[in-house]
Image (tube, helix red, strand yellow):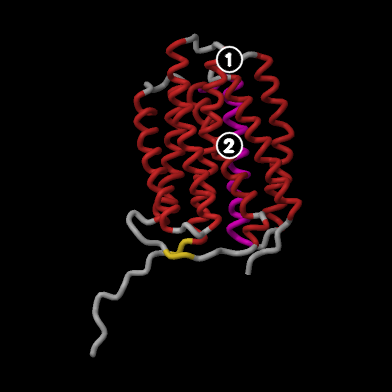
Amino acid sequence: MSPVPNKTLHWLAILLAIGTLLLIINGAIAGPTVQPAAEALSIHRLAAIPVSVLTLVVVLWLIFTDARSQARALGWITLALAILQDSVGHAVVQAMAPHTAGIAHALMAPMFFAAVVAIALVTSPAWARGPELVSDYGWPSNRTLAIVTPVLVVIQITLGAAFRQGTITLMPHVLGAMLVALVILLQGIFVLQQFPAHSALRLAGRTLLGVAFGQVFLGMTTLIMKSMADENSTPVVIAATFHVTGGAITLATATVLSILVRRNVQPRVEEEIDAPAS
């Protein structure tokens, strides 16, 4: 039986997702430098306070009132990500292992954002209506891609953060972008071709394709602008900020599609090989 939706918790989760995304944008503007500008750093730290308070409200409400074990587990995961994000953020500010902490901070933020978006999904009225079951087919299976795609996006975000911190060259990030774009294209085509009448999967598949290829365009634009202007110039900073934000949105969208696939798409049933006896 699907749970009765809690509209207040759902809208608080949406508000938290918006606040987290704005915080990611602000953090991207501050840049990956070891000692960011005092004004940008102060704004980022002050903006994190209401987000942290709202995080506690949402996750504790979910953990202690939701009867679903998976929803409570999602709450605990989100809380753990919030604590880790705050810890590595403190390490960045204090310049403790700045490159490692900077990469971790840039990775934890999109993962936390994806978790919050997942909370908004599982507390929504649409989720409460229950799954619309369809059967998986083809190779690779949609259920397998639902696991692989978010993992590859996380790796790609890590490579991007490592490049911005100056610990690796650009090539791994470029090659990773090609692989992730190919896998997302494959998953999106599979979903749209196999389940064209499934409204939730169709919408999530189209959204992921649009967001992912917009992110590829932003990445190319950022590289071109960096080759034409100083890295700290306003146009380059704006382009890089949109690219970082796009990475977080890509991960959140991939996570939503994966959850919907795992919920609605049943495992492929192997057909009987032996013919029935006459």
The part of the chain drawn in magenta is 68-97
> Toward the viewer: 137 or 164?
137
56 to the left or right of 162? right
Query: Which residue in the protein does label 1 denote?
Result: 35
Crowding around mark 2 (Cα neighbors within 10 Å: few <14, some 14 to 19, many 20+) is some
Q: Position of residue 88 (x, y in %)?
A: 57, 30
- Label placed on residue 84: 2
Above or below for 107 versus 220: below
Crowding around mark 1 (Cα neighbors within 10 Å: few <14, some 14 to 19, many 20+) is some
207 to the left or right of 180? right
Identify which residue is drawn at 68% across, 25% down: 45
Above or below for 268 versus 53: below
Q: Quadrant of residue 33?
A: top right
Identify which residue is drawn at 24% across, 79% down: 274
Q: Is residue 75 magenta?
A: yes
Q: Quadrant of residue 26?
A: top right
Quarter of the image with the N terminus in it: bottom right
Q: Quadrant of residue 49?
A: top right
Q: Main secondary structure of the magenta part?
A: helix
Task: Report the amino acid beneath label 2.
Answer: Leu
Q: Is residue 161 visible?
A: no
Q: Position of residue 52 (x, y in %)?
A: 70, 36
Q: CA distance from mark 2 to mark 1?
A: 21 Å
